[in-house]
Amino acid sequence: MLIPANESSVLTLRPSWLMVLPRLVPAAIVAAIVLLAFRYFQTPRGGVWMLAWYQWVVFALVLVGIALVIMWLPVQYAMTNVRALSRTGWFSRVTRDVPLASVQHVVMQQSVWESFTGTGTILFATAGTDGYALAWQSVRHPQHVLSRVRMALDAARGPSPRVQQNVNPSLTQPRVIGLVGGIGAGKSAVARALERCNYLVIDADKDAKAALDRPDVRGHLISWWGDAIVSSDGKVDRKKLAEIIFGDPAQRRRLEALVHPIVRADRQQVIAQAKREGKAGVVIDAPLLFEAGSDKECDVVWFVDAPLDQRLARVRSRGWSDEELTRREAAQLSLDEKRNRSGVVIVNDADLATLEIRVAEALAM
């Protein structure tokens, strides 16, 4: 048992099995040379000594299977309320552990292979050591794991002393959380979960659409793109506008320069309202949070992540095609860039109850 009996389990996981593939390459080359040499000397003169394709397939599967048993299966990682641990080896079991109280900081790094496979390495550093005292290699959903680890560290260290204990609560500003993520990742579901935690939600997309129908904004759009940009009901034709801005980055930036200052000014009024109402904070649900520079108004940015197949299913239910999703995301910062610039990653790949738990855990950080 990896976790001591007198400690509470916080996190248990294994590395991704894909970790064995890059380590397998040198061994596979050597094994293939030995196999071919053996085949050559065992084959009568004039016979066919090369392996058939199906024999290569069997050889590869056997090699991968052996590597999984030797290099992947015995590896375990865990965190308790007291320590972080790793265990490796079959016959000579090696267990490393680091007391949480001695951890100075924890970081996530990705090699080229880990970036390609969506895994990462969690590194624990302690005082008085060079390098890192413990490494969890090739873990899946590394940003989510990093968030869980940091939350456990904060819990182990206990509450930090606060200098402003006697500050009048009416003078403090509400916490501002920015929400970003891929289209169809479930940002709205996260926003609703935060709303149930006494947060006031600002839907930047909705506010931007409302700004388009202001007479002064509509007048600018007509002067740029003609009367055809307005539909028969006198409102801006959203479909025609989307065709213009998603087909020409310069036109999109032109529109953003007009609308974003209006939305930002309205947002400040909402934050002031949240302060008056004693809200825990404000959520800015904005697909273009980074592009508009609105991340500077946030105390923290959350990246909502979800597998591509789930995101596609959600946008299809809205009547979008797969090509439309690709086209719209191509007009924004890449998902990797958004993820790297965010402070918290919320993985939305399960049911609503699981999402609620992950949101609560992130709020506790």
Image (tube, rainbow, N blue to C red):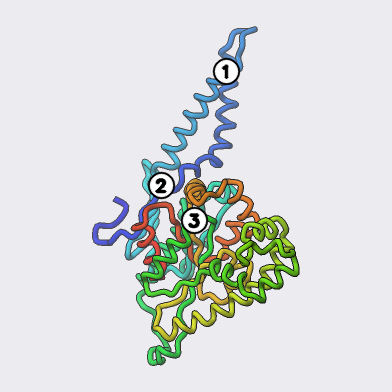
In the rendered image, residue 276, in percent from the top left (x then y), is placed at 43, 86
Sequence-first tag of 1 and 3: 1
- In whole angstroms, how far apart are the C-alphas of marks 1 and 3? 46 Å
In the rendered image, residue 21, in percent from the top left (x then y), is placed at 53, 39
In the rendered image, residue 153, in percent from the top left (x then y), is placed at 39, 68
Residue 7 appearing in the image: yes
Residue at the disc numbered 1: 52
Sequence-first tag of 2 and 1: 1
Mark 1, mark 3: which one is toward the viewer?
Answer: 3
Q: Residue at x 51, y 67 (%)?
A: 285
In the rendered image, the vertical position of residue 133 relative to residue 219, given as above or below: above
In the rendered image, residue 228, in percent from the top left (x then y), is placed at 71, 61
Left or right: 254 in relation to 283: right
Residue at the disc numbered 2: 75
- In whole angstroms, how far apart are the C-alphas of marks 3 and 2? 32 Å
Sequence-first tag of 3 and 2: 2
Residue sitting farthest toward the front:
232
CA neighbours of label 2 inside 10 A, class few (<14), some (14 to 19), many (20+)? many
- Badge 2 marks a residue whose secondary structure is loop
Left or right: 297 in relation to 152: right
Q: Residue at x 33, y 65 (%)?
A: 82
Residue 138 appearing in the image: no
- Badge 3 marks a residue whose secondary structure is loop
Which mark is on residue 113? none
Q: Residue at x 28, y 61 (%)?
A: 8
- Image marks 3 and 2: residues in contact by CB distance under 8 Å: no
Residue at the disc numbered 3: 185
Three-letter code, disc 1? Ala
Residue sitting farthest toward the left:
6
